[in-house]
Structures are given as C-alpha cells and as structure tokens.
Image: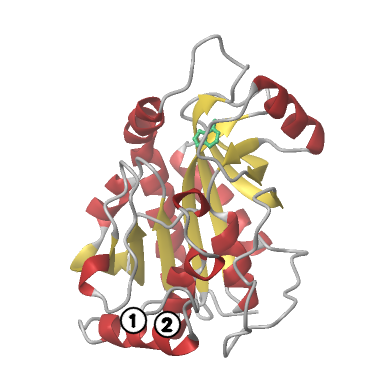
Amino acid sequence: MVNHEDGMTGADVQRIARAIAGRGGEPPRALVVLGSGLGRVSNRVEASVEVPFESLPGMPSTSVVGHAGGFVLGFLGGLPVILQSGRFHAYEGHGSDVLGLTVRVAAELGVSMLVTTNAAGGVRDDLHPGDLVVLDDHLNLQGRNPLVGPVLTGEVRFPDMTEAYDSELRAMAEAEARRLGTPLKRGVYGAVLGPSFETPAEVRMLARLGVDVVGMSTVPEVITARARGLRCLAISMVTNPAAGRTKRPLTHDEVLEVGDRAGAELADVLVAVMGRIAATAQPGGAK
Ligand code: HPA
C-alpha cells in the first residue's frame, strides 16, 4: 500500500509502470489523455489491452462522472500508445504528487510525448460549443504545481516552460485538421482549481489575462511532462460558453453531451497525427 501522506515516490511510480509493462504489448511512444466526454477516442485503439486503475498497485482512483478510470495499451493510427481515460483533478483533493502521476508512469514506460485533451469553457468571443482549440500556451491559476516535493529521477527541478506546447506537434495537428476539413483554432488555456464553475466576473478577469479557454485539468500533466522532457500536444474541446457568456446556467451534463458530438472529429485528428508520427523516422523524439 502506498502511504499517500508521504506522497508518491519514484519507487511507487516504477512499481505501477512495471505492472503495466507486465500486461504485454509494444512499449508505448505517447501517452494520450482523454478528457470529459472524450472517451470515444478509445474506440479507435487497435489491439487494445485494458488496464483499469484499480488493477494497479497503489494507484489512486478517480471519482468524476464521465471518467472511467484506466489505461488502454494499443495502437492509435499505427503508433503504440498508452491511452488514459479518467484523470486526477486537483479539485478531487489529490496531492500534487498524484496530479502528474500518470505522466510519470508513462515516462517510465518510455513515452516521449504527451497528447492531452480536455473539455473547456469558451472565454474568447469566437469560441462556441463543439469548437476544437489546439493550445499554444497556458496560465496555471490552480495555485499549485505537480512538481512540489522531491525531484524524482529523470526530472529537472526547474523545467523550462517557454515552449510547453511543442510547435512542431501543433503544426502537425493543424495540418492534419486542415486535410480532414476540421476547423482547429488556437488558444491559451487557463487552468482553474474548480470544482465550481467560474463566476461571470471571473470569466471577464480570465479574458483580460489572455485566457481563451478555461478548464480544471491538463496543466499539471503538461508541467510534469516538461519536467521529464516530453513533448506536449493539447487540444481543448469547447463544451460551453464560459459563465456570463450565455444566459443559461452551466451543468456538467452539458459538458458531457457536446463531448459526445464533437469527440469524433477530435478522434479523427488525433488518429491522423499519430499516424503521421508513426510514419516519420525520428518520431516524437524527446527534445
Ligand atoms: N469552466 C471550467 N472548466 C470547464 C468548463 C468551464 O466553463 N467547461 C468545461 N470544463
């Protein structure tokens, strides 16, 4: 049993990684994280081996509606990946160490890329439910950082965040979206703690700070990934206009519903990007 008071240690991370590696399959090259309502991407995984979180030694469980909670090993667009459905949010009360846990585990398994998706509220005026937004930067407004605590093996204390979102992967996503005829906008993600949605005044503040989409996830994963030298690609699906941008109150059901409709397009883009990486000589190499 892991003593969560002491936080997840490097040994805990390695134990979980060994348990996953023991399930067989090709070593994954990318960790693909699925946000709320984006579970349909997992239907596109070939030769899949399911690894529920509860089957892993010392792995915490997630508690959010719409998050199943587990890994799937398999191929997406021909690229060996480890897919994560269900993620650990700060608002569930997890410690900093748990927020980046799956990224650390995937890094132990040898992935060189994090591909992460989320449901987000549209702060910028031109963003509407169903829009896909590739992230080019973020604001960490959660008041916490997943790297607080000891420096684990393979990580740096002060990771550079100048290009947290890899420009080459972003260009690839934009090119593939264009080819598929799927509009893909660009934006800055603002990560808030939640779980309450924002007030209209908070949304106006976020807009002034330069936030285009707002959500409660992703940033801890990206920070952890950068500490491990992984390249990051992140795509938000706008599920609702942020508070005050619409007259209606926000519900989590709305977030899940839109995810279901626009999720297929996002899945197509991700499969295409993975396919392109699988086909290149130096795919997703750490930089
Ligand atoms: N705010 C914060 N997180 C979210 C939202 C939102 O409007 N929509 C989906 N996740």
Percent from the top left, x then y, of residue 39? 30, 47
* Crowding at mark 2 (Cα within 10 Å: few <14, some 14-19, many 20+): many
Q: Residue at x 46, y 71 (%)?
A: 101
Identify the residue at horizontal 51%, vertical 68% (top origin).
100
Left or right of 27: which side holds 134? right
Please state the horizontal and vertical placement of residue 99, each as a whole percent of the image.
Answer: 50, 63
Q: Is residue 166 left or right of residue 37?
A: right
- Mark 1 closeness class: few <14, some 14–19, many ≥20 residues within 10 Å: many
Whether residue 232 appears in this view of the structure is yes
| Kind of element beneath mark 1 | helix
Q: Nearer the viewer, residue 133 or 194?
A: 194
The answer to whether 205 is drawn above or below residue 278 in the figure is above
Front one among 255 and 151? 151
Residue at 62% x, 83% y: name it: 150
- In the picture of the structure, the residue carrying the numbered disc 2 is 13
- Residue 47's quadrant in the figure? bottom left
Q: Which residue is mark 1?
A: 16
Q: Which mark is residue 118?
A: none
Give the colour scheme shown.
secondary structure
**What amino acid is at disc 2?**
Val
Q: Is residue 267 left or right of residue 200?
A: left
